[in-house]
Image (spheres, rainbow, N blue to C red):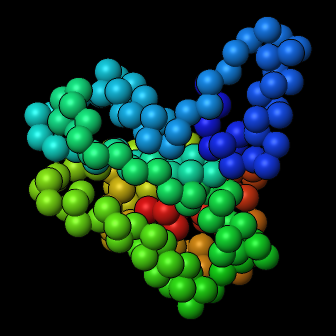
Amino acid sequence: VATSAVREAANGDEFLDQVRALTGVEVRKLTGNEEGALVFRAVRHAVDLGRGWTVLVDIGGGSTEFVIGRGFEIVERESLQMGCFANIQRFFPERAADAKQWQHAKTRLVADMQPFAQTFKDFGWKEAYGASGTIRALSEIAAARGLSDGTLDLKILQTLRRELTTAGRFSAIRWPQISASRKKSIAGGLLAL
């Protein structure tokens, strides 16, 4: 299957045609909502999400999917172009941000989420789960630094954001738990949270 990179590419359909011509493989282009539903089901099979309503956030490179469900029932799903690299391109092309730039970017993303935010809140969910390399990397940073057992909450995310915005360039951040390649994108993923 193909996800956000192919959905958003100007030549996405041409690329899929070439894949089919060269390999004989028919690749299906998923919508963002289909992508979110598949990730939710995969996480549901791997993790006990309990019996209540759960939100799943999947931060990719181009898009971020938000899914709310209970058990194997999915009731709402949204996909926005606010993945790691999409956010970096949109808000931080210089690969750096101060607190003011970060707040401006956050305000824009909150506005993007307004059409569905209240619907998600109305379900009264208590926990959110993440399914992405960015969330795993942030979790590892929090655990290694003794901020938590790897669980992320608003306070921890704010601490990490302050460190990122005071470091100057994103590449200068001193988080040894992440690779140099992850440093290039982690700000965009942290912004999505």
Residue 80 visible in image:
yes
In the displayed structure, would residue 152 be above or below residue 161? above
- Would you say 50 lies left or right of 128 here? left
Q: Residue furthest bottom?
A: 100
Residue 23 image offset from top left, x and y in percent:
83, 11
In the displayed structure, would residue 190 be above or below residue 164? above
Residue 39 visible in image:
no
| Quarter of the figure that contains the N terminus | top right
| Quarter of the figure that contains the C terminus | bottom left
- Would you say 20 lies left or right of 167 here? right
In the displayed structure, would residue 147 be above or below residue 43? below
Residue occupying the point 24% across, 57% down: 120
Residue 64 image offset from top left, x and y in percent:
50, 51
Residue 94 image offset from top left, x and y in percent:
79, 76
Front position in the image: 22 or 36 = 22
Q: Residue furthest top?
A: 24
- Would you say 188 lies left or right of 191 here? right
Residue occupying the point 49% across, 62% down: 192
Residue occupying the point 67% across, 71% down: 90
Front position in the image: 184 or 19 = 19
- Number of residue marks: 0
- Would you say 163 lies left or right of 126 here? right
Residue 12 image offset from top left, x and y in percent:
76, 39
Front position in the image: 182 or 143 = 182
Residue occupying the point 60% across, 86% down: 101
Front position in the image: 12 or 130 = 12
Residue 38 location, quadrant: top left
